[in-house]
Image (cartoon, helix red, strand yellow):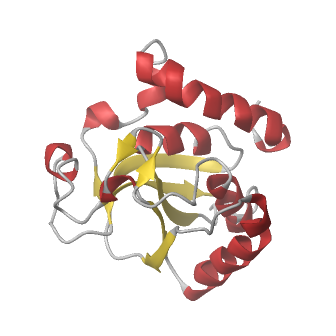
Amino acid sequence: MENLSVATFGGGCFWCIEAIIQRLKGIKSVKSGFSGGFIKNPPYREVRTDRTGHAEVIQVTFDPDIISYHDLVYIFMTSHDPTTLNRQGADKGTQYRSIILYHDVEQKEIVQQVFEEIKSLYEDSIVTELKPFEVFYNAEDDHQNYYNNNQDAHYCQIVIDPKVQKLKKMYSDKLVD
């Protein structure tokens, strides 16, 4: 029986973060969805209005014997801009905020450690929201595995491809062959 853990991250459009994290060794599943807000089971069309309080996030199930939570957080934090409030690139609104929803005190402490480790990488202060995990709502099926299913889409080529290429250069030892 595998000893699996769960992590929840949001850093702009969930398609981007999903594409990065699912390429790492030790990842068992990645689901795109919503968390951090106050509306129960919101559809995407409501979340994108910026009135639900939810962020676009991914829920990651991983094997900590293969990839540590520390490494996941570090890769997540260096795969998007954690210094822009409620925005990633052209995506604007609280639903695109940088957020980590920790599942226990140990995860919270690891996130705080990573924040200290990476703050010198950025000119501006890290604004990533850190809060306890409460609930995750799956996004609709057409949002799952988006990049892998739509690599010819303009958004994938312009926005996600460069992030995947950066991942390959920076973390080749952590990638699935």
The answer to whether 60 appears left or right of 40 in the picture is: right
Question: Where in the figure is residue 117, as x and y percent of width and height?
Answer: 79, 71
* Residue 40 in the image: above or below residue 77: below
Can residue 79 be seen here? The reply is yes
* Of residues 72 and 80, the one drawn nearer to the viewer in this rendering: 80
Say whether residue 63 is left or right of residue 138.
right
* In the image, residue 161 above or below residue 123: above
- Report the side of 117 relative to 57 (left or right): right
Residue lying furthest top: 152
Rendering coords of residue 175 (x, y %):
75, 38
> Residue placed at 59% from the left, 64% from the top?
4
Residue drawn at x 52%, y 67% as measured from the top left: 128
| Nearer to us in this view, 124 or 143 | 124
Farthest residue to the right: give it: 173
Which residue shows up at 73% across the image and 68% down it?
A: 119
Q: Determine whether, in the image, residue 65 is placed left or right of residue 17.
A: right
Please identify the quadrant where the N terminus is shown: bottom right
Up the image or down, 121 lies above or below 155; here it is below
User: In the image, residue 163 lies at what x, y percent?
Assistant: 62, 34
